[in-house]
Image: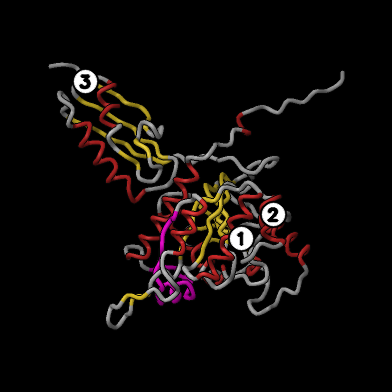
């Protein structure tokens, strides 16, 4: 019996495509250790993004391909995720306790951005990541209600606040510090200062991702985030409606100008399915998100239906990914999360922490 070689195993693994990074496992650098003991093979697959829901299917593909090699009698596969910090804007470094910050933005209000941000964060957590979410909408904070969190943050040292938690997310919002019906009558500089304080004075702990739910538009808060806060990537939320798309394009161009990579586009309210008769109708237009993604050379991460349950579940404090984890809409959110995280995973990594600081002193 001829002995199995590493080259044979690698050749077999090249036949398996990772649909999220759009490369085979070998070219994508996702093959870890390969151990061969006679006619038995062990393969470690290391993904750079959370995808717990796909691990077993991927392992089965590896077992089938490697197991088909002549002379192989058994295959053991281990699939795991290792999330690293990725490069941010020039002159900025990733924050302590946070590997990657993902901004969720829209050009205009009313497109379901906050609902998308919360479900994206929950979907990343469901796929195996450690996730936090920051409500950057100082004027209209919605995070406390959407996550069903009540109470005020505490501080262990009198300097930094502990984030509040629910559904496995670390969360911070100005809404935790004020009454729900209290208006924030602040000018721009106060708002941007509040955003920085909420971000930097919260004791975030071991986050793979911090999702930042931005207010709509391209004003002071967005500019502060783009210039002063280390953002690894952005997700643009829109509807198929022409007016929403016009404003979404402005948001996308803003991130391009400040050198924040756009991970992709999420199209909300893509289609309405009548709950009575099942009739499908594109109320807000059709294909707008796809066209925008094509025009700017970014990925269409996913399209979500206009569904009353998404609204009801978010208003009730148990967003869709938690309320109906096995449902079709939750699966769409998880697919969006995998795609966005995979787009981030193929970007440049941040190596600043690996190099020592060199200080030259006169002696």
Of the numbered discs 1 and 3, the one sitting upstream in the chain is 3
Q: Position of residue 189 (x, y in %)?
A: 78, 62
Q: Nearer the viewer, mark 2 or mark 3?
A: 3
Q: Secondary structure at mark 2?
A: loop
Q: Nearer the viewer, residue 171 or 30?
A: 30
Of the numbered discs 2 and 3, the one sitting upstream in the chain is 3
Q: Position of residue 173 (x, y in %)?
A: 62, 64
Q: Is 292 covered by the magenta stretch?
A: no
> What's the coloring here?
secondary structure
The answer to whether any part of residue 121 appears in the image is: no
Which quadrant holds the C terminus? top right
Q: Residue furthest left?
A: 1
Q: How many marks?
A: 3
Crowding around mark 1 (Cα neighbors within 10 Å: few <14, some 14 to 19, many 20+) is: some
**Residue where numbered disc 1 is placed:** 250
The disc at residue 4 is 3
Q: Secondary structure at mark 3?
A: loop
Of the numbered discs 2 and 1, the one sitting upstream in the chain is 2
**Residue where numbered disc 2 is placed:** 201
What is the distance, in whole Å, between disc 2 and disc 3 at their CAs? Answer: 55 Å
Q: Is 316 covered by the magenta stretch?
A: yes
Q: Point out the stretch of residues depicted in magenta.
A: 300-323
The answer to whether any part of residue 279 appears in the image is: yes
Left or right: 319 in relation to 205: left
């Amino acid at each position: 019996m001829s002995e199995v070689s590493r080259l044979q195993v690698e050749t077999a693994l090249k036949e398996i495509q990772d649909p999220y990074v759009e490369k085979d496992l070998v070219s994508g650098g996702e093959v870890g250790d390969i151990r061969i003991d006679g006619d038995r093979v062990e393969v470690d697959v290391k993904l750079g993004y959370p995808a717990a829901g796909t691990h077993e299917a991927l392992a089965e593909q590896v077992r089938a391909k490697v197991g088909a090699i002549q002379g192989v009698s058994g295959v053991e596969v281990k699939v795991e995720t290792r999330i690293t910090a990725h490069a941010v804007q020039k002159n900025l470094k990733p924050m302590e306790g946070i590997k990657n910050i993902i901004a969720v933005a829209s050009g205009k209000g009313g497109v379901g951005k906050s609902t998308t941000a919360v479900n994206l964060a929950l979907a990343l957590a469901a796929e195996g990541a450690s996730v936090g979410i920051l409500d950057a909408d100082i004027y209209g904070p919605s995070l406390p209600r959407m996550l069903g969190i009540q109470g005020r943050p505490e501080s262990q040292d009198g300097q930094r606040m502990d984030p509040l938690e629910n559904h496995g997310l670390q969360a911070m919002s100005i809404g935790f510090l004020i009454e729900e019906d209290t208006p924030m009558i602040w000018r721009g500089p106060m708002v941007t200062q509040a955003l920085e304080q909420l971000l930097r004075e919260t004791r975030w702990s071991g986050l793979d991702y911090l999702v930042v739910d931005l207010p709509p538009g391209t004003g002071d808060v967005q500019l502060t985030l783009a210039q002063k806060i280390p953002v690894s990537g952005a997700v643009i939320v829109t509807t198929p409606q022409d007016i929403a798309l016009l404003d979404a394009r402005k948001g996308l161009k803003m991130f391009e100008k400040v050198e924040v990579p756009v991970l992709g586009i999420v199209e909300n309210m893509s289609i309405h399915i009548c709950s009575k008769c099942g009739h499908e109708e594109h109320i807000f237009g059709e294909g707008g998100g796809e066209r925008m993604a094509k025009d700017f050379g970014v990925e269409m991460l996913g399209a979500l239906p206009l569904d009353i349950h998404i609204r009801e579940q978010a208003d009730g404090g148990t967003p869709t990914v938690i309320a109906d984890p096995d449902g079709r809409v939750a699966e769409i959110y998880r697919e969006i999360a995998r795609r966005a995280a995979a787009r981030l995973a193929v970007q440049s990594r941040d190596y600043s922490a690996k190099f020592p600081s060199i200080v030259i002193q006169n002696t």
